[in-house]
Amino acid sequence: MIKVAVVGATGYTGGELLRLLRVHPKVTVQSVTSGRFVGKLLTDRQPFLKGHYDLKLEALDPDKISKKVDFIFVALSHTDAMLPVFKFLAHGKKVVDLSADYRIRSSASYEKWYGSPHLYPSLLKKRVYGLSEVYRKQIASASLVANPGCYPTGALLPMVPFLESGLIDPAREMIIDAKSGVSGAGQSPSDQTHFPTVNEALTPYKIGRHRHLPEIIQEISTIGKIKAQVLFTPYLLPVNRGILSTIYLPLKKKMTKRQIDAVLKPYEKEAFIRLVPESPSLSHVRGTNYCDIGSFASSSGRTAILISAIDNLGKGAAGQAIQNMNIMMNWDEGTGLSAPGLYP
Amino acid sequence: MIKVAVVGATGYTGGELLRLLRVHPKVTVQSVTSGRFVGKLLTDRQPFLKGHYDLKLEALDPDKISKKVDFIFVALSHTDAMLPVFKFLAHGKKVVDLSADYRIRSSASYEKWYGSPHLYPSLLKKRVYGLSEVYRKQIASASLVANPGCYPTGALLPMVPFLESGLIDPAREMIIDAKSGVSGAGQSPSDQTHFPTVNEALTPYKIGRHRHLPEIIQEISTIGKIKAQVLFTPYLLPVNRGILSTIYLPLKKKMTKRQIDAVLKPYEKEAFIRLVPESPSLSHVRGTNYCDIGSFASSSGRTAILISAIDNLGKGAAGQAIQNMNIMMNWDEGTGLSAPGLYP
Amino acid sequence: MIKVAVVGATGYTGGELLRLLRVHPKVTVQSVTSGRFVGKLLTDRQPFLKGHYDLKLEALDPDKISKKVDFIFVALSHTDAMLPVFKFLAHGKKVVDLSADYRIRSSASYEKWYGSPHLYPSLLKKRVYGLSEVYRKQIASASLVANPGCYPTGALLPMVPFLESGLIDPAREMIIDAKSGVSGAGQSPSDQTHFPTVNEALTPYKIGRHRHLPEIIQEISTIGKIKAQVLFTPYLLPVNRGILSTIYLPLKKKMTKRQIDAVLKPYEKEAFIRLVPESPSLSHVRGTNYCDIGSFASSSGRTAILISAIDNLGKGAAGQAIQNMNIMMNWDEGTGLSAPGLYP
Amino acid sequence: MIKVAVVGATGYTGGELLRLLRVHPKVTVQSVTSGRFVGKLLTDRQPFLKGHYDLKLEALDPDKISKKVDFIFVALSHTDAMLPVFKFLAHGKKVVDLSADYRIRSSASYEKWYGSPHLYPSLLKKRVYGLSEVYRKQIASASLVANPGCYPTGALLPMVPFLESGLIDPAREMIIDAKSGVSGAGQSPSDQTHFPTVNEALTPYKIGRHRHLPEIIQEISTIGKIKAQVLFTPYLLPVNRGILSTIYLPLKKKMTKRQIDAVLKPYEKEAFIRLVPESPSLSHVRGTNYCDIGSFASSSGRTAILISAIDNLGKGAAGQAIQNMNIMMNWDEGTGLSAPGLYP
């Protein structure tokens, strides 16, 4: 039984962490923080948790929190997480950072995409990128895990076996056409997330310039040792949760559906990846840590069409964060993540 | 052919007015105003109107606008409309005010509910309440029509024949349980209208203290000459458009479904009221000026259950405003309002 | 650890039972049945459960199933459940029947509303109506629990304390205006549940003649010892899960909001009822066994306005069924039901 | 003023035709047919049209109908339209067929994709494919126009200028990732269109094997004189109306965004194509005959990313059908199609 803190407890990701930690058998949440609602009951801001937590929201004081807990989940906005993560580590704590602040290895690239210089470039060398299925060995011994973005998780997992097998043709562009539920945009209202704007629509945005693009490219080059050309088209989808990513993967040589499936086959032993016979469905991963993957071959055989479904708050954020904690703590990877999802 | 202005052209109601005026055969829109986007093209703020209007957004200058147009639709927020309406009238123009500023006849009640003293109480005596089917004679000779609120329109129309026939029992409470699409909350994003808040939910709000309550009570007492006790429960419904109002009407004497229908029968000659055999549907009034009404008797016969469906932006706002203009101009009431709605 | 069967495992309610039983610490699911898909893997029909169950769907053979399990959940359609329930009981098994077949105590009334004579009227005398918070003592010693309908659960729970305290005025009609998510209509497609029919709409149906009405009236008269007049207006709401019920309760004497809250206060000790300061929200009960209740007084004080939110598949079906099993087995009532809901 | 018939008047496309024809100044609808509801009022099956039509539904008798009308819209299912279209033509009538029966020029290909031999292959040589902006000259003198499928319309229009300019690289696969509202699946309920299946999801289907694929390929080869390799991924989107198509177009030589826009520039003079600065939105084309197009260049410049938004029932069906009638009758192309869309 360890004690944990959720830093940034009033957002969607913080709420999902608390939802999942509530049934984690080896963890007690001791501290929850908020910027604007210090002193209020957690359940005043997260009423769905009423009956589950009696905690009050604290100010974010890394020194004080470090005295109370062993492990910290940081669910703050980018740039806000940089400093507290550093301090928690200085106190010898283990941290999973769900913000973007430690995902990009290059501090120059971070500054370019996030508009702010990185204060702790040395930490960027030590942190491990928390794509659990790929980096679990490194995660096991990490103090700081940078939890992947939701789009990168959905985009990378299906292509990893192809990257590792050197099957992707870097001369042709790879396309990621990814549709996200609105909780991915966070809890702050905006014109873009106003109900009549999103409802009865499907809204492409930041085509070719979304902040998750450099993260995706970084991992493609790290895992696949190729310099990939990636077209990334994200959309706001009128649903609460879930990312459905369709990935058009240019292949070096022609492949059949059967051959494509053979490449994915090692995933059968993964607890949180399910290979599905046809297309995956957001409805089947809602509330879970699963990444469901369906596969198709183009008629010429030169392109693999991979479709993944994740819950952006689950495998795309809080679920994977807990999976990473389990790895870091040397627990079974699925501890506390065994509940089926909500259907319909 | 008359020239009109739409004051407050960038909101949902302004957009709906412009959509409908575009196909009105006797009207040209000459002026559109905006508080924040002066100088921009109207279609920059209302892209759905691209191809239909070339106008630029002007500042709200009643003197200047009065020189250009004969008739003004004011689609501003409450308290913002008071002064410009006064000025347009001073210039001898005809005005339909879609804000709440001239709906409440009592300036004391206005101040109580809208938190601001009324600057032109004398105008409150001259203005006509624009419930077209009830006040069309007065509207015909009015210079200022206060267009009804969306909830009052949906709530009042079904009960008007019962009020006029003296069938309602004022000793028992009347219940209005009314569910509104989110466009009724306007175009400004808020926590309440954030997509993940509204979606997959149904949110009651301001129970017994919604600003449309005094308006409803005023008209019940004016039309029915009774002091009614009204329970008004509004909800935010996860749809873009439409208000479905269920009205439980306490009857003085027992009535059958057949007798209830007989009371409603005069509505058969109304162009914009459709009596439906079962329940009405928001889908059948979308984009229209219709008020569809279904009726039921409680098994004891002591309560009439009336259900109305309107489009909150149509009969609940812009549609009725144009119907009122038609009456004020002595044109056929349905001029420009003859297009069927959008289904599905 | 007991062995259970889920009879009717391929519908929404069956799926929800299996979702919840998966994390129940004292139960193993040994048998799942289906009418049409015998021999298929459960997860072929409920793909969201993939990774959680390896069971094959069996034919419904009560004799055979009774040899394998101790406890049976019957999630069949009305009239289909009557016979198998009888057989399971004849084998000495305990049963929670989620169908309507044993809810109505009067076999004449059952026949009238469900169009089929009741084959086992003697069983109707022994079965216990499974509104857990009301009948837990009787449930504890029952062999057959008739799990309440979703609408009756949401409608009755808020009014029970008023019924028990004799506060309701039977001379005036009580109104239940209840809006249900579409999963409540089951898994069979129909014109009524076709996406473009339900979406962007709110559809009242079977006003005053819904089959849950006699069930509600039965319990009002049993619990409150009054002959109530109930107006029941159900709606199809464009969401997947949840029932929001607004109940207008006529009071014998005037009450303030404070007095109303005092009547509800005993619910504070109930694990699955949460009293909320304002209106409850479907979003806060999704996937849970909670019934959230908000309360208001009419301005005259003569009517209590109670609003309840439940998940129709949770407290309205599978959740309450498991709560009832816990009571029947003399386990802690919340066993296996402690996970927070999914938000947003 | 001509007289027209709508054959197949009770489906979504029939309803949309009748909605639009109601405000068409040169047309009177004289005859509406139905397979199952002969003798009923049209408005019994299309209640949203109440107040607009008094017609009764007739049996489909081409001889009889040909005596009453000059022009016929056929809105039947594929294979059902083949014979009546032939008969109407034999009577010397003009026909726009909205089914798939005359879209595919090759009768062999028709048989392969639609599972039925084509009875009138000679007609296939005479019919004109009704993509208005491309074939308006041929449409002007046609007796039979095969109205394009909804997906092909949204997919082809953006790429036409690139096809005509010979800019597409046929050696690389072109990708069409197209998301459709559920009305595109028609009015018959099914598991796939059941509300809880579609809602809170996004469902890819028939990847690489949708019946609109051969239609798209036929036109690419006709217009562009290339043998294209097309990956076509359709999805069911949880909205009522609209198709958003993202097209990844492989370019022969590198192009900038500016150069791409120059290729599209001729569309500026098209009444029903709007080039938009960023991404188009389904909300801005709802209920219209517009095809809105946004354009992007990949960072390498080797791929044009074109996004189109249409209303599947408008430009994707009934709107384009009326545009085609206007061309066939030598009227202004936009006659009766000038109303703005519904927003929000």
Image (cartoon, coloured by chain):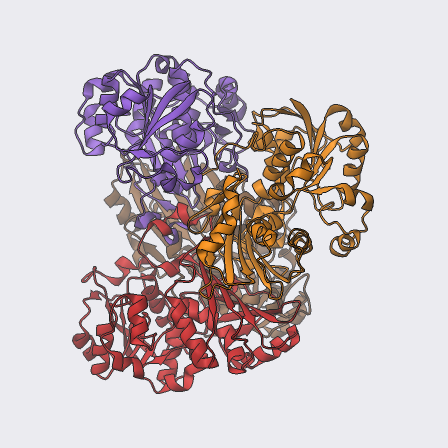
Chain colours: A brown, B orange, C red, D purple
Q: Nearer the viewer, residue D310 or B260?
A: B260
The answer to whether residue A59 is left or right of residue A329 is right
Write the residue at 39% across / 35% down: D15
Residue at position x 26%, y 58% in the image: C44
Q: In which quarter of the image is the C terminus of chain B?
A: top left
Q: Is residue C281 above or below residue C338?
A: above
Task: Please state, as top left, top right, bottom left or bottom right, where the N terminus of chain B lies in the image.
Answer: top right
- Give the mark count: 0
Q: In terms of image quadrants, where is residue C141?
A: bottom left
Q: Which of these two is toward me, A122 or D306?
A: D306
Specify whether residue A39 is in view.
Answer: yes
Give the quarter of the image for residue B319: top right
Q: Which residue is drawn at 62% across and 77% down?
A: C253
Q: Is residue D70 above or below residue C70?
A: above
Q: In this view of the protein, can residue D241 be seen by the observer?
A: no
Dividing the picture into quarters, in which one does residue D243 lie?
A: top left
Residue D298 shown left or right of residue B64 in the figure: left
Up-down: is C2 above or below A170? Answer: below
The image shows residue A15 at horizontal and vertical percentages of 54, 63
Residue C167 shown left or right of residue C201 in the figure: right
Residue nearest the viewer, comparing D154 with A254? D154
Q: Nearer the viewer, residue A75 or C304?
A: C304
Residue D207, image x and y in percent? 31, 40
Q: Where is residue B242 in the image (x, y as percent from the top left)?
A: 53, 46
